[in-house]
Image: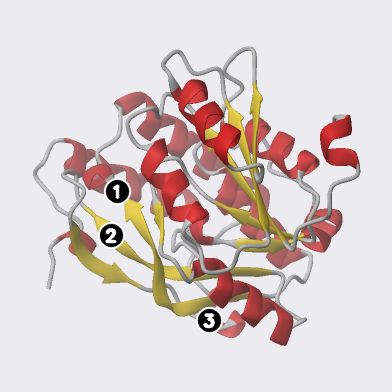
Amino acid sequence: MNDKWADAPVPAVSIVMAAYNGEGTIGRALDSIIEQTFTDWELIVIDDGSTDATANVVQGYAARDPRIRLFRNESNLELSASLNKGIGLARADLIARADDDDINLPQRLERQVAYMQEHNETDVLGTAAYLLDETGQRVSVFMHPTTHAELKNLPFLKIQFFHPSVMIRRSFFDKVGLYDPGYPNAEDKELWLRGLSAGCHYANLPEPLIEYSTGGYVKSWRSLLTHARSLLRIARKQEIENGYRQTFTLFARMAAVNLRIYTPKSLRGA
């Protein structure tokens, strides 16, 4: 950490954002953080070897707001390594995730900080989300289960959290470890399962506090295959019953989304 930050007051929340070629969306994401009603934060942006103007956009914001800190990877290290770098640079005991293409609603941090202060047992706290389609329009609200009892008993492929909505205690990483780069496109799933195995406590707020960009859930075929391989590794590691079958079923469904012959229920609107 450079001298500029060594003597600066430690904020209540460190927000970690990994960015890659996000020049078209990151400005809105940064605006949504600056507009938070809770103001005692620092934002650590890891530019993961972008080849566009992402770093320049962030640098412009950082020049106007000293709470924003930009760090650049010389090459593309991918999400897990970039997030781990950001967590290592974070100074607060509460670490929030944010993505370069999602919007944080104004009271997100305020609501999460208040909950974490009142619930010392909670290690990771997510929120519900407004889902955005490929055009950036809200199409639905999606809420994951809210209680630890529900979250720990979810089936293997059900998701505990919207990853860019979570707020995590530093003690969680001390107990569980950081993201494992060996599970690309499923690093969050592997981390949450590892946390459950370590006895960590989870919760979700029922109110939508982010706008989550789905892109219609259309991914590159390479991304889908990488995701499937990571899920198979997780199923083997966690000894998930029928984990392979569940993964192949999910891959078939996502392939149908890519071929535009199936639309996920969450994107069909009311």
Q: Amino acid at mark 1?
A: Thr
Q: CA distance from mark 3 to mark 2?
A: 22 Å
Q: Quadrant of the N terminus?
A: top right
Viewer-side residue, 245 vs 79 = 79
Q: Quadrant of the C terminus?
A: bottom left
Indicate whether 63 appears above or below 232.
above
Query: Which residue is drawn at the image coordinates 20% and 57% (left, top)?
Result: 264
Residue underneath mark 2: 131
**Does the rendering let one see residue 28?**
yes
Label 2 crowding class (10 Å Cα cut-off): few <14, some 14-19, many 20+? many
Question: Residue 18: where, in percent of width, then height?
Answer: 56, 36
- Residue 46 left/right relative to 25: right
Indicate whether 184 appears above or below 10.
above
Q: Residue furthest left?
A: 261
Q: CA distance from mark 2 to mark 1?
A: 7 Å
Earlier-in-chain disc, 1 versus 3: 3
Residue underneath mark 3: 150
Q: Contact, CB < 8 Å: mark 2 with mark 1? A: yes
Q: Amino acid at mark 2?
A: Leu
Mark identifier at residue 214: 1
Query: Which residue is drawn at the image coordinates 70% and 77% (left, top)?
Result: 122
